[in-house]
Amino acid sequence: MESVRQSKVAKLIQKELAELFRAEAKNMFFGAFISVTVVRVSPDLSSAKVYVSIMAPGKDEKEIFKIITDHNFLIRKKLGTIIGKQVRIIPELHFYVDDSYDYAQRINDLLNKPI
């Protein structure tokens, strides 16, 4: 069960990371559209699992995800300057690709497949 504080911090991180990805899309991520779908924060607020969905026209999504993971320190630093006054500890960010849309699409295709 997630505490109220965990959910508030998770929503704050989700909102600010989404804005950060939007602002830096052209410079860092080759214009890819990156949306933060879910953020889950640990009970001690020291780490956060960030699930991202990537739409990159003309680029490989795995390549964009590698850029995100390679720039993890820089992203956390920029996040810290934004939310540093609101939280005591800036959580370690662990990024994961959110493939729930692809999974749902695959199930839909299987259900619509003729027998």
Image (cartoon, helix red, strand yellow):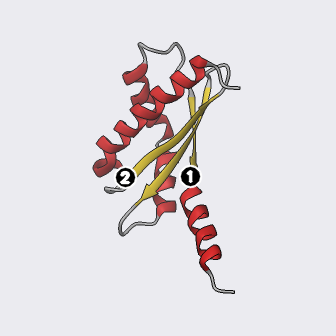
Q: Is residue 101 above or below residue 25?
A: below
User: Element at badge 2?
Assistant: loop
Residue type at mark 2?
Phe
The circle drawn on residue 78 is none
Question: Residue 105 at x, y = what percent?
Answer: 56, 67
Residue type at mark 1?
Asp
Pointer 1 residue: 98
Marks counted in the figure total 2
User: Element at badge 1?
Assistant: loop
Q: Contact (CB < 8 A) between labels 1 and 2?
A: no
Q: Gap between marks 1 and 2, in whole Å?
A: 17 Å
Q: Is residue 12 above or below residue 17?
A: above
Q: Residue at x 64, y 86 (%)?
A: 114
Disc 1 vs disc 2: which is toward the camera? 1
Q: Residue at x 44, y 14 (%)?
A: 86
Pointer 2 residue: 29
Q: Residue at x 45, y 66 (%)?
A: 60
| Residue 91 shows in the view | yes
Q: Residue at x 58, y 56 (%)?
A: 100
1 or 2: tag closer to the N-terminus: 2
In the image, is 90 to the left or to the right of 34? right
Question: Residue 103 at x, y = what percent?
Answer: 61, 62
Question: Residue 115 at x, y = what percent?
Answer: 69, 86
| Residue 99 shows in the view | no
